[in-house]
Image: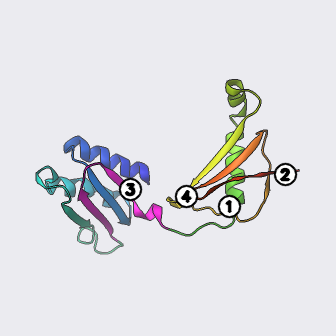
Amino acid sequence: MQRSVDDLQREYEAIADVPLKVHFVGNMEADNLAAVVPALVAQDFPSKPISYRFEYDTTALHPDRAPLHVYVTKGLRPEWYSINDRAGFVDRNPHPTIAAAIKRKANRLAQYRATVGDDVRLLIIANRFLNSGKLLLEDAASFDFHGFSEVYFFSYPEAVIVLNRAS
């Protein structure tokens, strides 16, 4: 989803190089997203003062389905993201996700060893500000390290946990 938002940001900034804070909430379907840049261009943000605010939604465009709401503020630096990706439940059983991350990174272990030597340690970061990072490791589970010397789990911004090796 962030790639789609980044694409919209690049498209808008190619037309009007104005730093905007743009937050998306709701239905992120392609045709809703396609309407955003023309709506922003129509607002003529270059002529507006810093802190100028604008709200856009796709209700009129697609009255028969859930809308996309776009909250825009002219700012000093650009900040574009989907609120949908920053709110949600916390996974209290992240073991399968962590195990999959270790296994996926282990596919490049030979390359890592060739670069840094035999003592290769893995840091897995879960950014709790994003939906994909809302993981809470509550117990001291053991994991297959797949050849890594140590594995750490950082639930940003909370704490780093040294994971236990499965015997």
Is 82 on the left-hand or right-hand side of 122?
Answer: left
Residue placed under numbered mark 2 in the picture: 166
The amino acid type, in three-letter code, at marker 2 is Ala
Q: Earlier in the sequence, mark 3 or mark 1?
A: 3
- Residues under labels 2 and 1: Cα distance? 16 Å
The amino acid type, in three-letter code, at marker 4 is Ser
Residue placed under numbered mark 4 in the picture: 132
For label 2, the SS is loop
User: Which region is colored magenta?
Assistant: 67-87
- Residues under labels 4 and 1: Cα distance? 11 Å
Residue 135: horizontal and vertical position, in percent? Answer: 62, 61
Residue 20: horizontal and vertical position, in percent? Answer: 26, 53
The amino acid type, in three-letter code, at marker 1 is Pro
For label 3, the SS is strand
* Residue 78 highlighted magenta (yes or no): yes
Q: Earlier in the sequence, mark 3 or mark 4?
A: 3
Residue placed under numbered mark 3 in the picture: 81
Residue 5: horizontal and vertical position, in percent? Answer: 37, 52
Mark 2 touches mark 4? (CB < 8 Å): no
For label 1, the SS is loop
- Residues under labels 3 and 4: Cα distance? 14 Å
Name the quadrant of the N terminus.
bottom left
The residue at 64%/48% (across/down) is 124
Q: Earlier in the sequence, mark 2 or mark 4?
A: 4
Mark 3 touches mark 2? (CB < 8 Å): no
The amino acid type, in three-letter code, at marker 3 is Tyr
Residue placed under numbered mark 1 in the picture: 94
